[in-house]
Amino acid sequence: MAIETKLRDYLLSIKEIQSVVGNRIHPGWLPEKPTYPAIAYLQISGVAHHNIPIAYPRFQFSVFSTKYSEAKELAEEIRSALQRYKGSMGGVRVLQGVWEGSRDMYESDTKLYHIATDFKIIYREE
């Protein structure tokens, strides 16, 4: 059970997120010529304890939109969904979602607002 796929499934189950992006939550990078708004996410560090089955990788969720307010709202919905989350995420026992911070950016070449939000997801490896 890869936590990466469970994170996507979990975020798609949040109606406030799904109603805006549909199924446009992409692992890794956005596809070529995407429809906006869209979310891309990837693991940016893969840390785990060496003697107990607990992992705490860090993930970055990047929201892209042509509208700043829409990007901000989506980033806040992701934060609301993951910050302090505890429970089962598709069979993966998440002990805690920890918000690590975010950064607002504007990409002038594509005319897109990009908000990157980082989370540590602490979970039990089974």
Image: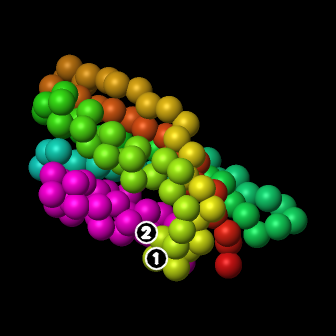
Secondary structure category for the residue under label 1: loop
Q: Is residue 13 above or below residue 117?
A: below
**Side of 122 relative to 105 (left or right):** right
- Give the CA distance from mark 1 to mark 2: 9 Å
Instruction: Look at the image and say whether residue 11 sits in the magenta stretch.
Output: yes
Q: In the rendered image, which quarter is residue 61 located in? A: top left
Residue under the point 13% across and 33% down: 66
Q: Position of residue 41 (x, y in %)?
A: 40, 50
Q: Is residue 65 above or below residue 87?
A: above
- Residue 87 visible in this rendered orientation of the protein: yes
Q: State which mark lies toward you, 1 or 2.
A: 1
**Side of 77 relative to 45 (left or right):** left
Secondary structure category for the residue under label 2: helix
Label 2, on which residue?
5
Query: What amino acid type is highlighted by mark number 1?
Result: Gly
Query: What amino acid type is highlighted by mark number 2?
Result: Thr
Lower position in the chain sequence, tag 1 or tag 2: 2
Residue under the point 76% across and 69% down: 53
Residue under the point 31% across and 57% down: 26
Q: Position of residue 110 (x, y in %)?
A: 17, 29
The residue segment tinted magenta is 1-28
